[in-house]
Structures are given as C-alpha cells and as structure tokens.
Amino acid sequence: MSEALRVGIAGLGTVGASVLKILRDKGEMLTRQCGKEIIVTAVSARDAKRDRGVDFSSATWFDDPIALARSNNIDVFIELIGGDEGPARASVEAALRSGRHVVTANKALLAKHGVALAKIAEDKGVLLNFEAAVAGGIPVIKALRESLTGNTVSRVYGIMNGTCNYILTRMWDEGISFEDCLADAQRLGYAEADPTFDIEGNDTAHKLAILTSLAFGTQIAADDIYLEGISNISLADIKAADELGYRIKLLGVALKTDSGIEQRVHPTMVPVESVIAQVHGVTNAVAIETDLLGELLLSGPGAGGAATASAVIGDLADIAKSRPGFQHGPVFGTPAKALAPYKRARMRAHEGGYFIRLTVHDRAGVFAAIAKRMADNDISLESIVQRQSAHDQPEATKTVILVTHETTEAAVKKALEGIVKDGHATDKPQMIRIERAG
Ligand SMILES: NC(=O)c1ccc[n+]([C@@H]2O[C@H](COP(=O)([O-])OP(=O)(O)OC[C@H]3O[C@@H](n4cnc5c(N)ncnc54)[C@H](OP(=O)(O)O)[C@@H]3O)[C@@H](O)[C@H]2O)c1
C-alpha cells in the first residue's frame, strides 16, 4: 500500500462538512479503490467551536486557510470557502505555488481567475480539479475535459441553476406567480436570502463561462456573456408557451458561430417534447453537441451537500490514484498557455426563432400594423394570434402573440422598436428566444 494522501480542507459548511462525512463513512472503500488511505490532516473555517455534525478533532485546526494551504502536512488542498477573491483565491494560489494539488467547488473563482490559476498549476505540475464547480454532482467537467477529447463541440447548453428551474417548474405546474414561487424557494432553502445572483442569471453565467472554455479551447470570458434573468417571466408567458408546445427554462448556451462564440444566459423556450424540457425542479442538465456523438445529455442533482461532495471526492480520488512523476493533463483540457483568445459573436447577429407577447390597444388596424412591421424586417411568422384581454389587463387592450421562424435578433429588435414607436403597445413587449433542443 502506498503512503497515505494527506488532505487539508478549508471551508466546513454545506459542502465541506459533507466531504468530511463521506471520507469518514467510506474511508475503507476509498482506500481499496485508490490503493492508499486518504487522511484529513488539517481543516480551516471561521468558527472553530461550531458543531459540524462530524468529528475532525484529529486534524490540525487553522484559523487562516492560507497558512493551511502552505502547510507541509498536506498533499492536497480542498477549497470550499467560496467567493472569487479574498481567502478562497489567496489560499488556492498559495496551495498551487507551494506545489499542492487543489480541488475546489468554486465556480466564481474559476470564472474570474481560472486561466491564471491553471497556468500556475501546470507550471508546478500539480492538479487543479473542479468537477463540483459546474452542475454539482453531474460529471460534466470530466466529460468535456477527458471523455470527449477528439470531438468537435458545436454547442453546449443547459439548466445550471436549481433555484430558477424550481421557480419555472412550479409556475408551470401550479400557476403560481414568480414572486410567490421565489418566496417558497427561499422558505425551503433552495434560494439564498438575496436571490439576485441566481435569478438574474449570474450563477449560470459563471458555470457557462467554464464550460465554454472546456468545450471550445478558449480563454474564459465570464464578462462577455449576454445575461437576462427570469424575474420578468409572467404567468401569461408560461401559459402562452404551454399552448404553443414549449416550456420556458433558464438556459446557459455557448454556441460556435462563423463570427465567434455566442455565450448567453436567458429565459428560453424549448419544445415540450425535448429531453431538456422534462428536467424539472432543482435538477440540472447539460447538453453537449458534437460532430462524433450528436447530442449527449447529462442530468442530475446540481447542488446540495452530498451531490456536490460526490464530485469533490471523485476529484480527490483522481489525485490519490495518479502516479507520482506522471505528467498531469491540462486543467481546461488544453494547456492554459495554448487556450485561444475568446472571440465574442455579437448578440444582434444571433439567429433563431422568437416568441413575442404584446399588449396592445384594442383598436382597428393594430394587428395589420404589427404584421407589417414584421414583414418590413423580413421576419416570417410561424403564427400570430390575438387574445381577449386577461382579467388583470385594462379593458381596452388585447394580447397579441407571435412566433417567428428563424430570423436575427437585430431584425426582431428593430421590428419591436417600430411597433412601440407606432404607439400600439401599452407595455414593454416581451420577447423570449426559442432554442432548438434534442
Ligand atoms: N452548497 C452547494 O450546494 C454548492 C454546490 C456547488 C458548488 N458549491 C460551492 O462550494 C463552495 C462552498 O459552498 P457551501 O455551500 O459549502 O458554503 P457555506 O456553507 O457557506 O460554507 C462556507 C465555509 O467557508 C468557511 N469560511 C468562510 N470564510 C472563511 C475564512 N475567511 N477562512 C476560513 N474559512 C472560511 C465558513 O466557515 P464557518 O462555517 O465557520 O462560518 C464555512 O465553513 C462555494 O464555492 C460554492 O459556490 C456549493
């Protein structure tokens, strides 16, 4: 049996405490699988006295995670603190520079500093593993980094935020408003006290930025993502989508186009018969489209202590199984120095179908004027229907719902500007992009 692998864990919250419990409960199995024992020799968190439901008294306590990261008593540093700066960044950097392998679940850190950290890891010949950072327990990082080597990826898209999917699922299933669903999600612990980061799409964007780099061999460009959250999705949209054969999901999409890469996070209509439309509640799913495989869909729990810890343990086991002196593969599948610059495709050039919901004055000629604005911008319509006002709308309005054939974002934006300028719309038009999905 080889020498034991010594592990230091910084952050003993939801994920950190779960990792400790799994290492305690499954120690024998892991030793058998890895050919060596995994021992937690050091831990760090803010409060040394807090009961974490697991005994770690045999490990050395560090108040300072950076000192833990530099400790000679560890081979692997597991960062489970969170945040893109502060102690998380400083401790991961310190561990890598000290020649320690690192495992982290920190998507915010990787989205911002992933390439720089990968360069340090590769220079030092150590591993930086981060399976838990995207879609929790779903092994999508390994799939893209290792299993799909040799495939040319054309598109990656997915549901990567459980809070948003929970809210959209309940709005659809139960006809409950966005605000009421969000309040329930907070009560049940699915949403943070400040849910902005989740519902406005930032969390999905961090994960998408990491997947884009892995899928297309480009530098991470988390600030170059088109972002729209779900807070303006109404029950009227959900109902209309249902009638048209779609479901609304918050998708992160990375797509290779002739002019660059589209990275976008926004509410999206997907055909009700597509597999991704069947992903409900807090479940996550990531679809990867490649030349050799067609479409691969991975679905499962995207958060929670046990599911996230499962990915952390898998990463740790890879380190335990790696052979000393053996050259490790690059952190993002392509050596960090060889990652291509990211070239953004302009959103106005995005091509696809669109759902448009307009609330308009109920007067003669409006319907024809809307159709004309669409035709003037070369937009071909799959359907256009007129509805009576809903109860909560003023008397003299009507709802007009349009579904376009494939067109460009620029054309749709121009047509909608025209409709607003004509004075027909009483509210801001609602526009939801339709995504092709298998
Ligand atoms: N929770 C999930 O479902 C999930 C899923 C995927 C990825 N992640 C990622 O996993 C990471 C951890 O998430 P979590 O949910 O476990 O967070 P958490 O429950 O808030 O735990 C954070 C831990 O970090 C410790 N900490 C904070 N500041 C510290 C400092 N300056 N020095 C040392 N320790 C410090 C805290 O100590 P105290 O306990 O003493 O306050 C706590 O133990 C984050 O990057 C998150 O994005 C989480």
Image (spheres, rainbow, N blue to C red):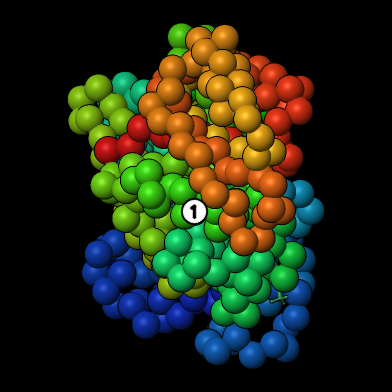
Q: Please tell me which residue lies in front, 243 or 349.
A: 243
**Which image quarter has ligand 1?**
bottom right
Write down the residue under mark 1: 238
Please tell me whether residue 291 is drawn above or below residue 184 in the rendered image: above
Left or right: residue 401 compared with residue 316: right
- Within the image, what quadrant is residue 69 found in? bottom right
Could you tell me residue 65's position as x and y percent? Answer: 71, 63
- Within the image, what quadrant is residue 263 found in? top right
Could you tell me residue 262's position as x and y percent? Answer: 53, 24
* Mark 1 residue element: helix
Q: Locate the C terminus and report the quarter of the image it occupies.
A: top left
Could you tell me residue 97's position as x and y percent? Answer: 65, 42
Q: How many marks?
A: 1
Residue located 68% across and 24% down the image: 419
Please tell me whether residue 315 is drawn above or below residue 182 in the rendered image: above
Q: Locate the N terminus and report the quarter of the image it occupies.
A: bottom left
Seen as rendered, the residue at the extreme front is 364
Q: Please tell me which residue lies in front, 309 or 241.
A: 241
Residue located 44% across and 17% down the image: 380
- The reply to whether residue 221 is in sight is no
Could you tell me residue 382's position as x and y percent? Answer: 38, 27
Q: Amino acid at mark 1?
A: Ile
Q: Residues within 10 Å of mark 1 (few under 14, many from 20)?
A: many
Residue located 39% across and 52% down the image: 242
- The reply to whether residue 374 is in sight is yes
